Amino acid sequence: MAETKTKATSASVAEYLASRGSAQQLADCQQLITLLSEVTGQPATMWGPSIVGFGRYCYTYDSGHSGEAPLAGFAIRGRDIVIYLLAESGEQEQLLQQLGKHKMGKACLYIKCLADLDTVVLKQLVVNSVAELQRRYG
Protein backbone atom coordinates (compact mmCIF):
# COMPACT_ATOMS: atom_id res chain seq x y z
CA MET A 1 0.00 0.00 0.00
CA ALA A 2 1.31 3.46 -0.89
CA GLU A 3 2.56 5.64 1.93
CA THR A 4 0.85 8.98 2.50
CA LYS A 5 3.01 11.76 1.06
CA THR A 6 1.47 14.72 2.85
CA LYS A 7 2.73 14.72 6.43
CA ALA A 8 3.30 17.40 9.04
CA THR A 9 6.77 18.93 8.73
CA SER A 10 8.88 21.46 10.60
CA ALA A 11 9.05 23.78 7.58
CA SER A 12 8.28 27.46 8.13
CA VAL A 13 4.74 28.59 7.36
CA ALA A 14 5.96 32.18 6.98
CA GLU A 15 8.63 31.17 4.46
CA TYR A 16 6.14 29.14 2.43
CA LEU A 17 3.66 32.02 2.30
CA ALA A 18 6.35 34.57 1.44
CA SER A 19 7.60 32.36 -1.40
CA ARG A 20 4.19 31.82 -2.98
CA GLY A 21 1.81 34.64 -2.25
CA SER A 22 1.04 38.06 -3.63
CA ALA A 23 0.60 40.90 -1.14
CA GLN A 24 -3.18 40.35 -1.17
CA GLN A 25 -2.81 36.60 -0.72
CA LEU A 26 -0.41 37.12 2.19
CA ALA A 27 -2.91 39.38 3.94
CA ASP A 28 -5.72 36.90 3.30
CA CYS A 29 -3.58 34.00 4.52
CA GLN A 30 -2.85 35.82 7.77
CA GLN A 31 -6.60 36.20 8.30
CA LEU A 32 -7.09 32.51 7.50
CA ILE A 33 -4.39 31.56 10.00
CA THR A 34 -6.25 33.51 12.68
CA LEU A 35 -9.61 31.98 11.76
CA LEU A 36 -8.42 28.39 11.43
CA SER A 37 -6.33 28.58 14.62
CA GLU A 38 -9.35 29.91 16.47
CA VAL A 39 -11.63 27.13 15.19
CA THR A 40 -9.20 24.25 15.75
CA GLY A 41 -7.35 25.60 18.79
CA GLN A 42 -4.13 24.60 17.01
CA PRO A 43 -1.24 26.57 15.46
CA ALA A 44 -0.42 26.61 11.76
CA THR A 45 1.91 23.80 10.67
CA MET A 46 3.22 22.91 7.23
CA TRP A 47 1.93 19.64 5.80
CA GLY A 48 4.11 18.55 2.93
CA PRO A 49 5.64 21.37 0.91
CA SER A 50 2.49 23.41 0.31
CA ILE A 51 -0.39 22.94 2.78
CA VAL A 52 -0.80 25.06 5.88
CA GLY A 53 -2.65 22.78 8.28
CA PHE A 54 -4.24 23.08 11.71
CA GLY A 55 -4.67 20.17 14.10
CA ARG A 56 -4.74 16.59 12.90
CA TYR A 57 -6.90 13.53 12.69
CA CYS A 58 -6.16 9.88 11.92
CA TYR A 59 -8.23 8.10 9.31
CA THR A 60 -8.61 4.58 7.98
CA TYR A 61 -10.51 4.00 4.75
CA ASP A 62 -12.50 0.86 3.94
CA SER A 63 -9.60 -0.12 1.65
CA GLY A 64 -7.35 -0.31 4.72
CA HIS A 65 -5.32 2.77 3.76
CA SER A 66 -4.68 4.92 6.82
CA GLY A 67 -2.85 8.09 7.66
CA GLU A 68 -3.02 11.53 9.24
CA ALA A 69 -4.31 14.79 7.81
CA PRO A 70 -4.94 18.30 9.10
CA LEU A 71 -8.40 19.06 10.51
CA ALA A 72 -8.44 22.26 8.47
CA GLY A 73 -5.98 23.87 6.10
CA PHE A 74 -5.27 25.98 3.08
CA ALA A 75 -2.75 26.41 0.29
CA ILE A 76 -1.85 29.01 -2.30
CA ARG A 77 -2.42 27.56 -5.75
CA GLY A 78 -1.53 30.14 -8.37
CA ARG A 79 -4.05 32.98 -8.19
CA ASP A 80 -6.36 31.03 -5.91
CA ILE A 81 -6.30 30.21 -2.24
CA VAL A 82 -7.66 26.73 -1.62
CA ILE A 83 -9.30 26.05 1.73
CA TYR A 84 -9.67 22.37 2.57
CA LEU A 85 -13.00 21.45 4.15
CA LEU A 86 -15.89 19.03 3.97
CA ALA A 87 -19.10 20.49 2.59
CA GLU A 88 -21.24 17.43 1.90
CA SER A 89 -24.24 18.04 4.15
CA GLY A 90 -27.33 20.04 3.32
CA GLU A 91 -26.37 22.65 5.94
CA GLN A 92 -22.92 23.05 4.37
CA GLU A 93 -24.46 23.40 0.90
CA GLN A 94 -26.78 26.14 2.18
CA LEU A 95 -23.83 27.95 3.76
CA LEU A 96 -21.92 27.74 0.47
CA GLN A 97 -24.82 29.52 -1.24
CA GLN A 98 -24.43 32.38 1.27
CA LEU A 99 -20.63 32.47 1.19
CA GLY A 100 -19.92 34.73 -1.76
CA LYS A 101 -17.71 34.30 -4.82
CA HIS A 102 -16.05 30.86 -4.81
CA LYS A 103 -15.77 27.50 -6.56
CA MET A 104 -16.15 24.23 -4.69
CA GLY A 105 -14.51 20.92 -5.55
CA LYS A 106 -14.90 17.68 -3.60
CA ALA A 107 -13.13 19.04 -0.49
CA CYS A 108 -11.50 22.18 -1.91
CA LEU A 109 -12.97 25.65 -1.64
CA TYR A 110 -11.31 27.91 -4.24
CA ILE A 111 -11.32 31.65 -3.60
CA LYS A 112 -9.60 34.67 -5.13
CA CYS A 113 -9.71 36.86 -2.01
CA LEU A 114 -11.40 36.95 1.37
CA ALA A 115 -13.05 40.27 0.57
CA ASP A 116 -15.33 38.31 -1.82
CA LEU A 117 -16.66 36.21 1.08
CA ASP A 118 -18.81 36.50 4.15
CA THR A 119 -16.20 35.47 6.73
CA VAL A 120 -18.86 34.64 9.34
CA VAL A 121 -20.24 32.05 6.91
CA LEU A 122 -16.72 30.82 6.13
CA LYS A 123 -16.02 30.32 9.82
CA GLN A 124 -19.23 28.28 10.22
CA LEU A 125 -18.26 26.14 7.22
CA VAL A 126 -14.92 25.40 8.88
CA VAL A 127 -16.53 24.74 12.29
CA ASN A 128 -18.95 22.27 10.67
CA SER A 129 -16.18 20.60 8.66
CA VAL A 130 -13.98 20.09 11.73
CA ALA A 131 -16.94 18.73 13.69
CA GLU A 132 -17.74 16.24 10.92
CA LEU A 133 -14.12 15.05 10.71
CA GLN A 134 -14.03 14.58 14.47
CA ARG A 135 -17.35 12.73 14.37
CA ARG A 136 -16.13 10.38 11.63
CA TYR A 137 -12.61 9.76 12.85
CA GLY A 138 -12.65 10.57 16.58
Image: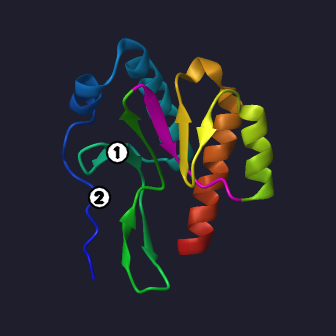
Identity of the residue drawn at 29% across and 58% down: 6
Residue stretch rendered in magenta on the structure:
79-88
Secondary structure under badge 2?
loop
Q: Position of residue 86 (x, y in %)?
A: 60, 55
Residue under numbered circle 1: 51
| Residue 73 on image: x %, y % | 44, 45
In the rendered view, how is the structure colored? rainbow
Q: Residue at x 38, y 77 (%)?
A: 66
Quadrant in the picture for the N terminus? bottom left
- Report the residue marked by disc 2: 6
- Of mark 2 and mark 1, the one earlier in the sequence is 2
Position of residue 9 in the picture relative to residue 127 (left or right): left
For numbered disc 1, what is the local secondary structure? Answer: strand
Magenta stretch containing residue 84, yes or no?
Answer: yes
Work out whether residue 78 or residue 100 is closer to the camera in this orientation and state it.
78
Left or right, 49 with respect to 84, comes to left
Q: Amino acid at mark 2?
A: Thr
